[in-house]
Image (cartoon, rainbow, N blue to C red):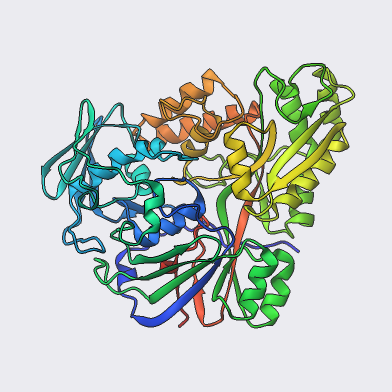
Amino acid sequence: MKKVFRPLVFAAVPLALMAATPVVAATLTIGLALEPTSMDPHFHNLAPNNAMRQHIFESLTQSDENQLTQPSLAVSWEPTGDTTWEFKLREGVTFSNGTPFTATDVIYSICRVPRVEGSPSSFTSFTRDIAGIEVPDETTIVFTTRAPSPLLPTNLASVAILSAEAFGGENVVFGADGCENAGTYPASTDFADPSVAVGTGPYKLVSFNPGDRITLTRNENYWGGDVEWENVILRGIPNPGARVAALLAEDVDVIETPPIQDFDQIRSRGFKIEQGLSNRVIYLHVDSGEAVPPGVSGTDGRNPFADVRVREAISKAINREAIIDRVMGGVAVAAGELLPWPLFGTSEDAEPDAFDPDRARELLAEAGFPDGFSVTLFTPNDRYINDERVAQAVAQMLARIGIRTSVDSMTASTFFSRRGQGDYGFWLAGWGAASGEMANPLLALTATRDTDAGTGLTNLQNYSNPELDALIAEARRTVDDDARRAILQRASKIAMDDYATIPLHFEVTPWAFKPNLSLTPRVDQYTLAMGITAAN
């Protein structure tokens, strides 16, 4: 039977509607599939962290459930030149400790982003374009960029605003020589202290107990008015069965990503399930550098992944529809590029590679590996929906064309740490585009890695294509939407034709929750207490 998922509906939801919700003196408890790694909103560009921080810290702009850019701490913005953007700040906003929000807080926050020590995935790609900041009056802030930066308003939705005064940065200046008078930047570990985790968001931190729970309470100073829940408890429950058990026992009110095989049981017990197509692509990365990467053997000293024919063989050996049907229970969509249509820069005719094991074997032989080789596929086992099971299915399919594949699975925290250290030659991961447009995954996953330039920050596979880099750079400085869309479509086709990364499928995200609640699915897969309400 054909599965029907909620489509991507591009209808903006005004921020003011949240403020109109009546107060409910109640506690909402959410079971998370993966807990945040830090309370520091600038530490780790990871979905659980990004979702968590929105309860406490806000940005100049925000993305709604369809990833349309909406006002937040800025009420409006417009380009005033090829390389200048003027933002009007919201008046009357205070931080949870009562200090007023000003343009200085924006400057301080942008100054801190590149100075976070030990960040496993930096936010610098969102601020890299900014070359200067001016404050002509107390409600206006003007950004000068190094080149035309059409995505600056979208990018700033990912930059959390801290209180400059809280850290002695009330005299900070963003000048030609960098940031000055910024005081002392806080360490990431400091944000576990509620007195440090000071934001303008609807909630404030009560406690952060890793491995147990995060407790929030309503921010009485919130500029947006009363929020629905007086208290919010977020519990990290990485085991899917344990999450379902917690819901059925009514120990939690909402859970993320219930296992597909448990849907019938959940519904039979009177709970609701809501699903929505997400922007998260599950993909395979291969180290395509010259050296034989970790986990590869039987190649006579050659790196097989450096040959595009081997990368293509891997893609054609994978039966995506079989994975969707047998592993994902039909709750996923096969991927032909890194974002689903109709998000910005995607192509309606971008089809997934057809399953063709015969051609895959021919490609291996043409590349000089007629007998295949051996490889280890690394994967998290608690980060993405059925991630380890997907990896096992991929391994079995590759074995049938002669690529003898073993799977090494581990918790997400271990996986990402080892990935950052270069321990893998072949791995499964996922990417959700924070901006909801194609430049984001192309820049992060396929652009040549250059930490100084902020490109390829998650390109740990030594992939480099000058033609693709040039198109990504052109798209990033093209303000006209129609022209930028066409450039991104060309860039995506080049990346897919070169198998810069191998997309498998887009996740369809499920949530399960008590029958007295309503929940709106988000394309970015974030679980936000602000998007959960008492049912009418």
Residue 241 in the image: state x and y as whole percent: 70, 68
Task: Name the side, left or right, on which 228 lies relative to 324.
Answer: left
Residue 84 in the image: state x and y as whole percent: 23, 34
- Callout count: 0
- Quadrant where the C terminus is found in the figure: bottom left
Residue 18 in the image: state x and y as whole percent: 34, 69
Q: Nearer the viewer, residue 494 or 412?
A: 412
Q: Nearer the viewer, residue 204 or 500?
A: 204
Q: Nearer the viewer, residue 47 or 367?
A: 47
Identify the residue shown where x is 66% and y is 56%: 385
- Quadrant where the N terminus is found in the figure: bottom right
Query: Residue 25 lies in what quarter of the image?
Result: bottom left
Query: Residue 94 lies in what quarter of the image?
Result: bottom left
Identify the residue shown where x is 82% and y is 20%: 299
21 lies above or below 455? below
Residue 12 in view, yes or no: no
Residue 53 in view, yes or no: yes
Residue 490 in the image: state x and y as whole percent: 53, 29
Q: Residue furthest left?
A: 137
292 lies above or below 282? above
Identify the residue shown where x is 76% and y is 55%: 327
